Image (spheres, rainbow, N blue to C red):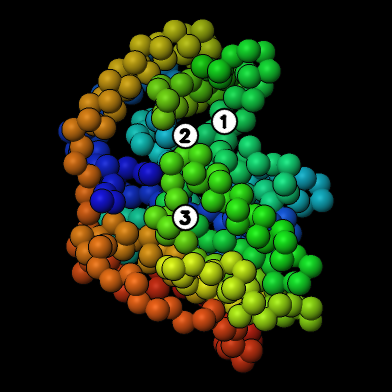
Amino acid sequence: MNAIPVLTIEDVATLDGVLGDFLKKTESELTVVIDRGGNVISQCGDMDAMDVTVIAALAAGSFAATRELARRIGEVEFNALYHQGNGKHMFMNSVDDETIMITVFGSRTTVGLVRFYSTATAQNVANVLKLLRRTSHGLKFDAKDISAAPVFADQ
Amino acid sequence: MSIINYASREIQFKIVYYGPALCGKTTNLNYIHQRINPLNRGDLVSLATATERTLFFDFLPLNAVVIKGFVTKFQLYTVPGQVIYNATRQLVLRSVDGIVFVADSQWEKMEENVESWKNLCDNLALQNMSIDDTPCVLEYNKRDLPNIAPVNYMEYVLNNRKKRLQSFEVISSTGQNVFAALNAASQILLHKFSKQSEAPQGAPLPVAIPVEPNSPQAQKLPA
């Protein structure tokens, strides 16, 4: 039985609350929760400044690539990664086996503060997703709701 | 597998272009990026070496409205074809929803095609998936070259199974059948999640959808 897990409006509101609180406390610009395949699950913050879809794909790749580095020193994986820029920085931390949280922040805050609050936030997000995976029934579409026309057109 | 976000009414699907080295996976994505309405696509991100060999992956996000009431986001990835990058292929395949397998039609590439296909099946098995349960289409690429194997032979080598996959003769450098293959993969993928997905799938498929030399696509080659 193939069905897609559903994030309900209530689930989204709960995640938004958790992520919004995190952004406020850390004064970060953007935080995105993604699965390890690079799909965006939830996002909060200034989304106009960045292409979240591309950031998610690259971050998932970056996180996975460093697993091999971690193995070389006897770790299963690195729980968190930090990329330091001149004005903007990125912090990524593991939420659970399937999920990663990305935070983009500027000079108004510090990596220490982001790291400190990200631990509790990741735990809260993990709890929401755990409940979702346990209770979600998944969705199947009505075949008549799927357009029969070619999905993409060569222009 | 992705999650439906009911608040934003968005669904995301991940389609991976898989195949041996230099078979034309990146060329497929380049053509799609060039020809699709810019309003429906994001940036093409390419993590390649200085010689344009894919090092990590290429990534192209596309938007479409194909399911009533939902914005459907398709994320197209390519894998690095070179044998040594298997760990990278495994991570790109993670959470995959659909596959376009690009085979090189040249005689001397047949062994690499088969190896890559086996590698795909092995890597899917690592994440408890099977090619039989995963929406997949075959592209027989480079049909414009002189030293190519006939389609029947490629079907025998790559598509010789009880439930045959839809296959396309493709010239990715000019774009012929590139969109046809992508659209077929997308439709199979979408219908996997429809309530009637258990409906007939066993209907015999035609031999590879042929390239049409005088098709409108052939007349308007990209610059």
Q: Position of residue B32 (x, y in %)?
A: 57, 65
Q: Secondary structure at mark 2?
A: loop
Give above or below for A78 relative to A29: above
Q: Chain of mark 1?
A: A
Discs 1/3, front: 3
Give above or below for B212 relative to A10: below
Task: Indicate the amino acid at tag 2.
Answer: Arg
Q: Secondary structure at mark 1?
A: helix
Give above or below for B44 relative to B166: above
Task: Indicate the amino acid at tag 3.
Answer: Ile
* Residue at 31% from the left image edge and 63% from the top image edge: B191
Q: Position of residue B78 (x, y in %)?
A: 60, 52
* Residue at 41% from the left image edge and 29% from the top image edge: A99
Q: Which residue is under mark 2?
A: A36
C-alpha distance separating marks 2 and 3: 21 Å
Q: Position of residue A86 (x, y in %)?
A: 65, 22
Is disc 1 in contact with disc 3, using a CB cutoff of under 8 Å? Answer: no
Which numbered disc, 2 or 1, marks the residue that appears first in the sequence? 2
Q: Secondary structure at mark 3?
A: helix
Is disc 2 in contact with disc 1, using a CB cutoff of under 8 Å? Answer: yes
Mark 3 closeness class: few <14, some 14–19, many ≥20 residues within 10 Å = some
Q: Which residue is under mark 1?
A: A64
C-alpha distance separating marks 1 and 3: 23 Å
Q: Closer to the camera, A32 or B104? A: B104
Task: Indicate the amino acid at tag 1.
Answer: Ala
Q: Which residue is under mark 3?
A: B131
Q: Which mark is residue B116?
A: none
Mark 2 closeness class: few <14, some 14–19, many ≥20 residues within 10 Å = many
Q: Closer to the camera, A71 or A58? A: A71
